[in-house]
Amino acid sequence: MWLVTPAIKADLNKIVEIERECFSSPWSYQAFLQELKHNYSYLWVAKDVRFEIVGFICFWLIYEEAHILNIAVKKAFRGKGIGSLLIKKMISFVKKRGAKWIRLEVRVTNKGAISFYEKLGFERVIVRPRYYFDTGEDALVMELEL
Ligand SMILES: CC(C)(COP(=O)(O)OP(=O)(O)OC[C@H]1O[C@@H](n2cnc3c(N)ncnc32)[C@H](O)[C@@H]1OP(=O)(O)O)[C@@H](O)C(=O)NCCC(=O)NCCS
């Protein structure tokens, strides 16, 4: 029902549109473009049956650590398993390449995302005070051991 593929440059406008819908301090087009250039960075999109992009994930894989930098699903498509699919595909991909754990930071106020990650087995590790420069909010570091 949902197809996950690596993003290409032509996907970036749609990704930025979803990013703006989902975050108060969205990444720019240029920021996503940079991610396409690094060999340790992966940007994948989830598409529906009409090949419309409905979500994306961006993560890094550096030696034993994978790090989720960004994940978002279009509002109208949430609660349908797309976020979980993106993470599960990522887990299988990084595991095969030797990753031992996955880490991420999430705003402590983003309760929905925290529940989402916990449902996928991520655990709370530590709070980094005033991690986000836009609001001064704390970040919760979460980790999944593989
Ligand atoms: C977090 C996000 C990616 C989840 O995507 P999604 O496709 O809706 O997630 P799924 O449908 O796979 O949800 C899987 C499970 O996570 C949990 N979950 C997801 N969103 C939740 C929410 N807002 N509140 C509580 N639990 C939630 C539920 O247990 C859900 O299982 P269920 O459908 O059986 O109830 C999506 O809500 C989103 O784009 N949020 C805005 C961007 C964001 O905050 N990204 C994270 C930044 S760190």
Image: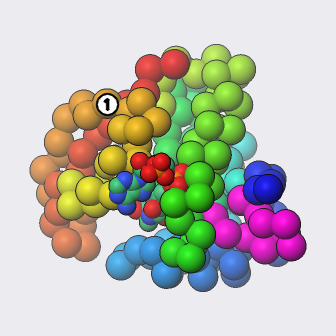
Q: Position of residue 71 (x, y in %)?
A: 52, 57
Task: Label 1: state its secondary structure.
Answer: strand
Q: Position of residue 46 (x, y in %)?
A: 72, 59
Asked if 144 appears above or below 7 in the picture, the reply is above
Q: Crowding at label 1, few (<14), some or many (≥20) Cα neighbours within 10 Å?
A: some
Ligand 1 visible in quadrant: bottom left
Q: Position of residue 43 (x, y in %)?
A: 67, 54
Left/right placement of residue 51 relative to residue 136 reads right
Asked if 76 appears above or below 65 in the picture, the reply is below
Q: Which residue is mark 1?
A: 123
Q: Quadrant of the N terminus?
A: bottom right
Residue 104 falls in image quadrant: top left
> Residue visible at 61% across and 31% down?
91
Name the residue at the right extreme: 50
Q: Position of residue 138 (x, y in %)?
A: 17, 55
Residue 14 falls in image quadrant: bottom right
